[in-house]
Amino acid sequence: MGALDAVQSWPVGSAAAAVVGPDGVLETTGEVDAAYALASVTKPLVALAVLVAVEEGALGLDDPAGPPGSTVRHLLAHASGLAMDNQDVVARPGARRVYSNCGFTVLGQHLVAATGIDLPDYLHQAVCEPLGLRATELVGPAGSGARASVADLAAVAGELLSPGRLVHRSTVAEMATVQFPGLVGVVPGYGRQPRNDWGLGVEIRDSKSPHWTGSANSPGTYGHFGRSGTFLWVDPVARLACIALTDAEFEQWAKDAWPPLADAVLTAYAAQ
């Protein structure tokens, strides 16, 4: 019996998943080399590309970007004030957590302007090549348009657990640190959260309830889920990560299935 056994009983056409530790993949199920549409799990990949550019000196986290008063950091942390799917400004920067796909489009445009390289090419050069990602490509918007395999995201998770091939450990620590603490906001699909904490391109679990990770996940767990029935989380206390990709829309089945899976993974591997 494996921690991922339940994945193959999910009400989806196909699914693949993996558990990752600091030394590599611990368990898989399904076709881990098959490419799936990531939807918003694209955002952590684009965030990593931005953080590579920051380390290279092409741009800075506190450079102006987006609406007046907003920075690269605000855009990464959904605190720029941009609306979800258009460039309307619905809050002043840093005042409220407004989940914004448009913010990532603006972020991608800023990265292209800073580097002179088209975003799909920069993602490939900055993230895919160093980590040996074979199936990952950006074919649509910066916040939702990537495709990737479980095998590729397992390599990304491995870098987040044991940084060094892509970015410095301190950069990953900053990525997983709450930016603009205490902001109220909505987690799509889960409603208003009085403390809607985010890092740089990743959601941070903290005390959110309900939530798509498990009851056993530490408050510092970070990651993202997508409307295409996909997720990636990293628990820095357990030193474990889990990825699941499916071909089904995020609906109630995912809310029911994902937290028990996370708890099963943590029960099986956290003490090892």
Image (cartoon, helix red, strand yellow):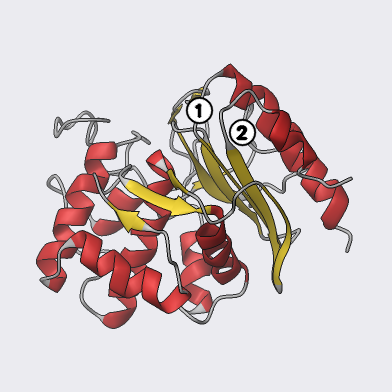
Q: Is residue 144 visible?
A: yes
The label on residue 248 is 1
Could you say which is closer to the camera, residue 105 or residue 195? Answer: 105
Residue plotted at (89% across, 59% down): 271
State the residue at coordinates (23%, 55%): 71
Point out the image quarter for the N terminus: top right
Q: Which residue is mark 2?
A: 212
Q: Nearer the viewer, residue 132 or 65?
A: 132
> What amino acid type is highlighted by mark number 1?
Ala
Residue 79: percent from left, percent from top? 32, 43
- Tell me which corner region of the image, top left, top right, bottom left or bottom right, holds residue 23: bottom right
Q: From what the image shows, is residue 135 above or below residue 166?
A: above
Which of marks 1 and 2 precedes in the sequence? 2
Q: Do the residues bearing badges 2 and 1 touch, measured as CB atoms within 8 Å? A: no
Foreground residue among 231 and 6: 6
Residue 199 horizontal/vertical position (percent): 46, 53
Position of 88 compared to 32: left or right?
left
Quadrant, the C terminus: bottom right
Q: Please tell me whether mark 2 sits on a helix, a strand or a loop.
A: loop
4 lies left or right of 127: right
For label 1, the crowd category at 10 Å Cα-Cα, with few meaning under 14, some 14 to 19 and many 20 or more, is: some
Measure the C-alpha gap from mark 2 to mark 1. Answer: 16 Å
The answer to whether residue 88 is left or right of residue 174 is left
Residue type beneath disc 2? Trp
**Nearer the observer, disc 2 or disc 1?**
1
Q: Quadrant of residue 81?
A: top left
